[in-house]
Image (cartoon, rainbow, N blue to C red):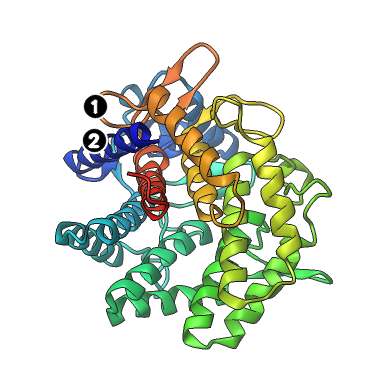
Amino acid sequence: MTEFRKKLERSINSLEKWVEDHEYMAYEPFDGLSSPLRALTFGSHFLDRILLQTIRQSPINLRPLFGVKPLPSTKGRGYMAGGYLERYKQTVDDKYRQKALENLDWLMENKSGKFEHYTWANHFPFASRGGRYSADEPIIVWTALIGQVFLDAYELFGEQKHLDVVKSICNWIMKLPREETASGACISYHMFKVASIHNSNMLGAALLARAGKLLDESGWIKVAREAMLYSCSRQLPDGAWYYAETENMHWIDNFHTGYNLSSLKCYIDSTGDEQFRRQMIKGLDYFIRTFFEESGRPKYYHNRTYPVDSQCASQAVETLNEFSEFDERCLPLAVKVASWWIDNMQDRKGYFYYRQYPLMKAKTPMLHWSQATSYRGLVMLLSELEKEGIR
């Protein structure tokens, strides 16, 4: 384990240097519609999807050919800020405090202009089978995840402006449309229409619960409970969740399951509500048994490995780390996943590759999707090893 610890620290340091040398800018998997060639899709949703997925799915980086340039990333900045906060707690080195605060200030300055509240969007338009939205359309996933980092910063440094951001985010979440059912209410993925998706619903609920407990906002906690009721009552008998309940979204994948579990744990820890503990235990057991090969390589789907994706690895390490004191299987598995990831998917320059396919690797350097998420996940794992006394 000592050798792994050294490998982990080298990996973190080289990744940190790469991200900072590139000034927090790189590509993203879904940035294809920032191409000038989008004009040739003539506003067609179908052609937008073709363009985006052609660039996203290609093992060869087509972005320079299509005129797609590296962009800033609100999600990447949020994850890097979270990683810096954790590094500050590990080292008490003021440089990490400064880096975290600088990234949080950047996020405050670069919120979506579509709402008065603090929310965040992509720096590019997006199109999928669920619809399309513009570059300034915030979604609950990134907004809630970033909100957790602002709450971490407030609890660490006590700056009122960070708590004010969290309040603003929660007020925006409370205004999102909700699908009301006899078994809970699902918080929508975005504002402009009802879109019920389990991971986004549970991520929003987790932030409402954590912030609601801190600020004594019973209304936020009530909405969070209804959201968890919606998703937990729709958990499959084996412990899995579909991505969403509509028939065209009945897939089960690694990192969205990780989001669900981390969110559910945050809700229970924040509120003390034990109603959904059984679903959490069943979901965690399913996650551990289903999404990892013996080597530690993370599978993408419940029934197939490829594409081996950076988000599956980074979120798996983070989720398993969060549950390390809850289930003794988690920390050894997190170490195994991280070790495989570093050995097989980290470039000598420090960045992590996007994906592994059966015959080749997609080595395009993404920012949020591969670097920032990996950075925070690995830093959190380092903290857990220190807690366990592993040097």
The residue lying toward the viewer, choosing from 79 and 391, is 391
Whichever of callouts 2 and 1 sits on the residue coming sooner in the sequence is: 2
Q: Position of residue 152 (x, y in %)?
A: 38, 68
Type of the residue with mark 1: Lys
Q: How far apart are marks 2 and 1 (CA)?
A: 7 Å
Q: Is mark 2 on a helix, strand or loop?
A: helix
Q: Mark 2 points at which residue?
A: 14
Q: Where is residue 189 in the image (x, y as percent from the top left)?
A: 59, 59
User: Can the viewer see residue 244 in this picture?
Assistant: no
Q: In which quarter of the image is the N terminus?
A: top left
User: Can the viewer see residue 160 in this picture?
Assistant: yes
What residue sits 28% from the left and 37% below the top? 70
Q: What element carries label 1?
A: loop
Q: Do the residues bearing badges 2 and 1 touch, measured as CB atoms within 8 Å?
A: yes
In the image: residue 365, left or right of residue 128: left
The residue lying toward the viewer, choosing from 144 and 43, is 144
- For this orientation, the residue located farthest to the top is 359
In the image: residue 274, left or right of residue 382: right
Q: Quadrant of the C terminus?
A: top left
Other-residue count near label 2 (Cα within 10 Å), few / some / many at <14 / 14–19 / ≥20:
some
In the image: residue 180, left or right of residue 13: right
Type of the residue with mark 2: Ser
Q: Name the residue under label 1.
A: 349
The quarter holding residue 289 reads top right
Q: Position of residue 100 (x, y in %)?
A: 25, 60
The residue lying toward the viewer, choosing from 264 and 320, is 320
